[in-house]
Image (cartoon, rainbow, N blue to C red):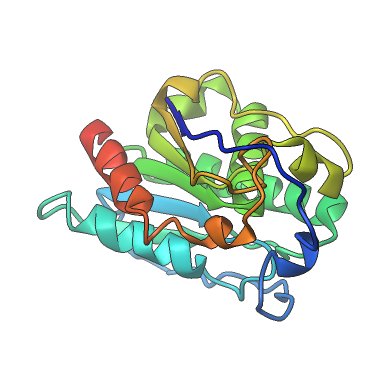
Amino acid sequence: MKITNVGPAARVVGALAAMAACSPALLISAPTAVGAPCPDVEVVFARGTTEPPGVGGIGQAFVDALRSKVGGRTVGVYAVNYPASRDFARSTPAGGDDMSAHVQAMAQNCPQTRMVLGGYSQGAAVVDLATTHMPPDVADHVAAAAEFGGARSTFADSLSAGPLPSVGPLYAGKTVEMCVPNDPICDQGGWDMGAHGAYVATGMVNEAAAFAASRI
C-alpha cells in the first residue's frame, strides 16, 4: 500500500544540509533485556539521518500512536542500532543488517510476537534493505511496515551510492509508504525540506499507526 502525493516540479536548494538539525549519531550497542517476556507486538524502528540513538521523533510518535490503538496488548520497541550518518554507503547497509538480525532473532525466540517494522527518511531505506534480504519464512512474523519520507526521488538517489531498492516483495502488501506533499526525498519534484519533517503534523503518523494496528 502506498500513500503518496506528487507536488509541482521545482529546484531543491541546500537540501542535504537541511536533512536534520541534530549532531551526527554515534553507533551504540542496544541493551539486551535478560529474561524479558515476549511482547504481544514489537515495533522495530530505524530513525532518520543524524537523529540521536533511539527511534527518533517520528518513530516515538508512531509507537505512541500504535499503543493507543491495540487495546491491552503489550508493545515492545527495538531501536535499530546503526549510525544514521550521512555516509549512506556504510550507514544504511549497517541498519539493514541490524534490523534483519533482530527480526530474525525475534521470529525464533518470540514466535507469537507480531512485529511492525518502521523507518523515517534513511530509516525507510533500512526497512527496504532488511526486507529485501531476510529469509522468506520471517515475513510471516511481520504484521505490517510503515515508511515515512522514504527515498523515492531522483534527488534522494543522488545522495546515496545509487538507487535504493523498494520494500521486499513479501512485505509490499503489508507496507504503507507515507509521503508529505513536496517532500523532496519521496516526492519526485518536491521542493520543501520542511515537508520532510511534517509527518506528525499532517496526521500521517497516526494514519500509518491505524494501518498497522488493523493488521496485528
Quick check: 21 above or below 84? below
Residue 160: in sight, yes or no? Answer: no
In this image, 46 relative to 113: left or right? right
Residue sitting at the far bottom: 23
Please tell me which residue is depicted at 50% across the width and 54% down the height of the picture.
45
Residue 107 location, quadrant: top left
- Image coordinates for residue 147, horizontal then vertical, percent: 50, 43
How many marks overall?
0
In this image, 123 relative to 64: left or right? right
Please tell me which residue is depicted at 64% across the width and 44% down the height of the picture.
190
Residue 142 location, quadrant: top left
Please tell me which residue is depicted at 43% across the width and 20% down the height of the picture.
173
Q: Quadrant of the C terminus?
A: top left
Q: Which one is nearer the viewer's eye here, 109 or 181?
A: 181
Please tell me which residue is depicted at 69% across the width and 62% down the height of the picture.
82
Residue sitting at the far left: 72
Quick check: 47 above or below 150? below
Residue 187: in sight, yes or no? Answer: yes
- Image coordinates for residue 39, horizontal then vertical, percent: 28, 54
Q: Quadrant of the N terminus?
A: top left
